[in-house]
Image (cartoon, rainbow, N blue to C red):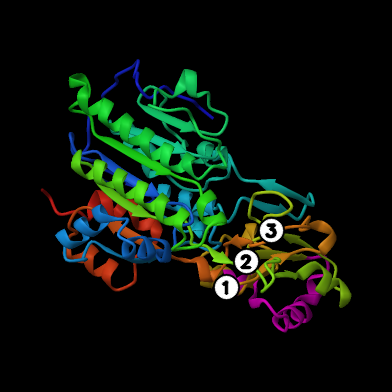
Amino acid sequence: MRLGRIAKYSHRIVPSRSLSVCANGKQYKVPEPNRPVVGICLDGSSQDYIDAAVEAGQMPCWIEISNRFKNHNKALGTAQMPALTVPNNVGMMTGEAAKFHGIAGNSYFDEERKVEVVMDDEKYLRCDSIFSKLNEAGTHVTVLTVKDKLIRLLGTGLNPATSMTLSLEGANSANLLPAPRPLPEIDDPDASIYLLELGLHAMQQRQKDPALADTPAVYHLSTSDALQHQYPPGSSEANAFYHKFDALLGNFDQAGALVGVTADHGMNDKSRYDGSPRVMFAGSVLREHGIACHILLPIAGGRQMLGSYATVHLENKDQLVAALAVLREEPGVYQAIGRDDACLALQLPEDRVGDIVLLGDAHSVIGRTPEDHDLEGVRGLRSHGGLEEQVVPMFFNRDLLPAHKKQLGRGKARNYHLYDMLLNGVVAS
């Protein structure tokens, strides 16, 4: 992880510029000077949060921008499965599905060594970074995240002299962050607002510096889902959070930035009527039927954090049909799919997926066994990972070209199209 100062850019290197760069076989236009490009991944934000805040009158800037383009600048998009933070941010960085970029979760199970491998380093990445290609062509790239787990991957290939990567987790606000207020705790939802304030500050500092005025700039700002894990859409806490976000969106817009907003996944309540977690313990179920396996839960966050996506690695591959039949009959299971079909349908890398991909329904999560998870006292579990958290908002503060507008309006946009839309799909102003 690299930590950089927001206020100072000690080196200014401007290589010869291209009009576009090629990443993974696709051309991306280099941003125009004086029109910074800002991609915001608003972690955990299903459209329900935004709709509730809009209805409560808490998002006037969102409404004003939407009305400006008669709502043709926004739609619902689709996230990469699993509906988790890491694979979806990497998808935005590469413009590709996990099948190509290789990051199918926070971790994968190495069957040969019988160990879970955390994929938090660029060595696990299998394709180009749009950010690094732009950086090579003379674009200054700033990547800000709340959590450390993203920063090494999103910083792949960036030149420290012409880029800045920063994770708030573990950062020293006194030495590294010249922001107007102290750094919140990382698990505080306000850390996400702070991150966006920091991105706005960084952009405004560059705009004020005449020496940097002719340098294109891209900002990727990835928040956390601390708010969404704690509070449902329409709650006073959620509406207050989106009101603060809306004000910052307005500030970016007024500063002339080209802004695109999407999410890595949505969020759903995964609780029973009494508030206890609704868990389908796949390990227990398979063990009862004499099926030995390792279950990978690729969502980060410790023993309590469960999601609606898991992969099952069978010790005896001949038991695949039996295991599928057992799992498909269990309450809380949306679907159990064999590796080949799952990789084809969900665009996953075959060598980083188990024999079975197991999907929980909208209100259930997948666990191993009750002994594996410390759920005593856990109430009101909100989580993600499954198909029901795959639908996400996509929003732009500029008009889109006809082809991109059609893609967005017909439900064919994926969240990993964010930078194609921002760099290639915006009407010239």
Amino acid type, callout 2: Ser
| SS state under label 1 | loop
Q: Residue 201, relative to residue 289: is it above or below?
A: above
Circle number at residue 308: 2
Cα gap from disc 2 to disc 1, whole angstroms = 8 Å
Residue 223 percent across, percent down from the top left: 46, 45
Q: Mark 1 or 3 closer to N-term?
A: 3
Amino acid type, callout 1: Ala
Q: Are marks 2 and 1 in contact (CB under 8 Å)?
A: yes
Residue under the point 26% across and 30% down: 204
Residue under the point 74% across and 52% down: 303
Residue 18 percent across, percent down from the top left: 22, 37
Q: Is residue 26 visible?
A: no
Residue under the point 69% across and 47% down: 117
Q: Are marks 1 and 3 in contact (CB under 8 Å)?
A: no
Query: Image check: 278 left or right of 287?
Result: left
